[in-house]
Amino acid sequence: MTSAQHRPVGPRYEGWLTGIDSICYGGDYNPEQWPEEVWEQDVTLMREAGVNLVSIGIFSWALLEPREGEFDFAWLDRLIELLHANGIHIDLATPTASPPAWFFHAYPQARVVTREGTVLGFGSRGMASPSSPDYRAAALRITEALGDRYGSHPALALWHVHNEYGAPVSEDYSPTSAAAFRDWLRARYTTLDGLNAAWGTRFWGQVYGEWEHVGVPAATPSVANPAQRLDFARFTNDSLLACFTAERDALHARSQAPVTTNFMAAECPSTDLFAWGREVDVVSNDHYLTAADPRCEVGLALAADLTRSVAGGKPWMLLEHSPSGVNWQPRNVAKRPGEMARSAFSHVGRGADAVMFFQWRASRSGAEKFHGAMLPHAGTSSRVWREIVALGADLAAASELVGSRVSADVALLWDQESLWAQGLEWRPSVDVDARERINTFYDRFWRDGVQVDFAHPSQDLSGYKLVVAPASYLLTAESAANLTRFVEGGGTLLVSFFSGIVNEFDAVHEGGFLAPLRDALGVTVEEFLPLRAGETLQVALDDAGVAPGLTGTLTASVWADDLTLAGASVVGTYLDGPAPGAPAITRNTHGSGTGWYLSTQLDVDALATVLAPVYADAGLTPSGLPEELEVIRRSGAAADYVVAINHGSSPLSVESSAALGTPAAGATDLITGAEVDADVKVEAGGVRVLRVPRAIS
């Protein structure tokens, strides 16, 4: 492990896609589902829509290797040549997400076993046991064959390994996995004494005397050892990642094209995104709106910002999203007119240099026949098709954004290991949800027009003015020291409750709750005081002479702490609840910076009040724009760019100086080519993409 100050972020690859210098536009193409005479129609329509990249071969293993060791590439040869002749680049997948029927018949021991002991069968999608040597050998064989045949093809822009690792298969409790888990533990702890100490096995008499006695944390009579569960999550991530890197290395040996795999950022809890981001050549993500969320545009923005952060700010790809409704949610709501463009340009504004869909042509058969597609069942007479063509033209017009970057002054901490640990059983309150806290804080910044990155707590944070820890339950001593140095160096740190509780072994820190952040925050937690279901409490605010303007009363819920002051000033006090008169919100000066602690759960509106003096400490100012107006800035080598999206039902007009940060003179709408007036008007449900001159200093 590198030191906290120098933890690498983002992919090591510095280039972009082979042969493409514009925004990538297209989607998953599954022509094997159609007669070949349809292929000609498809490429003609792709050209009409402005498609320049398609992902192929993702679920084609059974056709490419119909019998073990017997390959048939003839159909794929014809497809690639057709696409190449029409100027369409390919993102060629290794089809290892869905092994053929013959594989499971020949290697039944490679089937996944659930925690309850159910053996999963063939007939869906998904992966064999990632620990299976038979699966890994078969996956490597088909990958090497594809690399040998197509590695230098001029149509090849990108390799696409597997598909959505961890979804739907992640943890495997089979005997094969148990043996691999023991090997992983030996490498991590060396001795059984080391494992027993890390897992705290003297509790409940779980001490291991032989390696062969160590198993996977399958279903148990009561709660399984939480440290074992946490290590099994790490092992699962590492097993999936090892499958990826084996295929990646085989392709690197055979091709110069970059290699990716499509993440499901913010939606797939079995992969450690920051670890994976360092292994792919180009970061890519799949994102689907949650129909049940009336403000799903905020979740979209969160996923996009997280993906860009995993990429270390480098260009990244939206490799899948849906032109309209999906088919796998309880209620699959269709996108309304203009929503497709708003979704696409929100990703572009937040750093994506590719807008891709699942899928090109809607399937007539199979589990996803009701999923939206670029070419829907209604065909080219449909509204969806018209919007697809229009979006292709708009993205082409905006292609000078390619390579520009998004910068942020605020970092929200994201640590998958902490999310794994906090999500285990027997925590102080079932109402405490780490993702709820992350989402709520993010929503506040989104409404305030404050651009954020996501960051791992061990990485270099010196470039940020404000760092927020919404849910850092697991915080290593190294990471806590990193946060403390950030404050000492002049940064502003805001920490929410139930943070800094345990170390990497899910053991409470020596010195008690919040102990490793004592210097930065000036408080420790003596006792948790969670509330009963539905209870609320009141917090009285008093700036205490250190947080001007922080006055009034806020309603909080779910949680309270019994705080012990260690130098911090109290700026919020519990009026009632389990600790009336006790500190609720504190501010501490440490070194050249400040550390804030929020010991209760506030909703998105209440957070606005608390964040006002936090912003002041950090030297930040909310945009003051209407909440319905999403404005994102990208900076290029020669110009800056602004993407403005109106999510409301009425036109919005804002002064360009407020929206863009610069005078409007010379600003141009890239889509229309028109110069921008002093006031930037964004129609209801509309999008503006602007080239903005830099202010002369």
Image (tube, grey):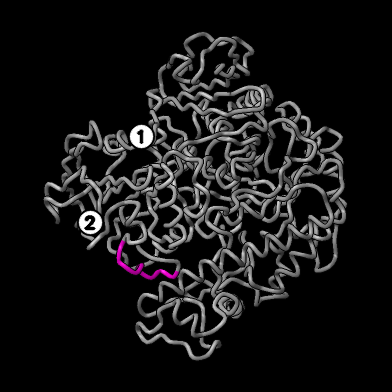
Give the residue drawn at x 44%, y 60%.
418
Quadrant housing the C terminus:
top right
153 relative to 53 in the view: left or right: right
Instruction: Report the label total.
Output: 2
Say which residue label 1 marks: 615
Give the residue drawn at x 87%, y 35%.
85
Please, what secondary structure does the residue beneath circle 1 have? Answer: helix
Q: Residues within 10 Å of mark 1 (few under 14, many from 20)?
A: some
Tell me the amino acid under the disc marked 2.
Asp
**Is residue 347 visible in the rendered structure shown here?**
no
74 relative to 679 in the view: left or right: right
Q: Earlier in the sequence, mark 2 or mark 1?
A: 2
The foreground one among 339 and 516 is 516
Q: Position of residue 159 (x, y in %)?
A: 75, 49
Q: Position of residue 483 (x, y in %)?
A: 43, 52
636 relative to 254 in the view: left or right: left
Tell me the amino acid under the disc marked 1.
Tyr
Please, what secondary structure does the residue beneath circle 2 have? Answer: strand
Q: Which residues are magenta?
A: 505-513
- Residue found at the far front of this picture: 591
Q: Position of residue 389 (x, y in %)?
A: 66, 25
Identify whether 390 is placed above or below 221: above
Q: Which mark is residue 561?
A: 2
Which quadrant would residue 637 be assigned to in this image? top right
The foreground one among 26 and 212 is 212
What's the CA distance linking mark 2 and mark 1?
24 Å
Quadrant housing the N terminus:
bottom right
Q: Which mark is residue 277?
A: none
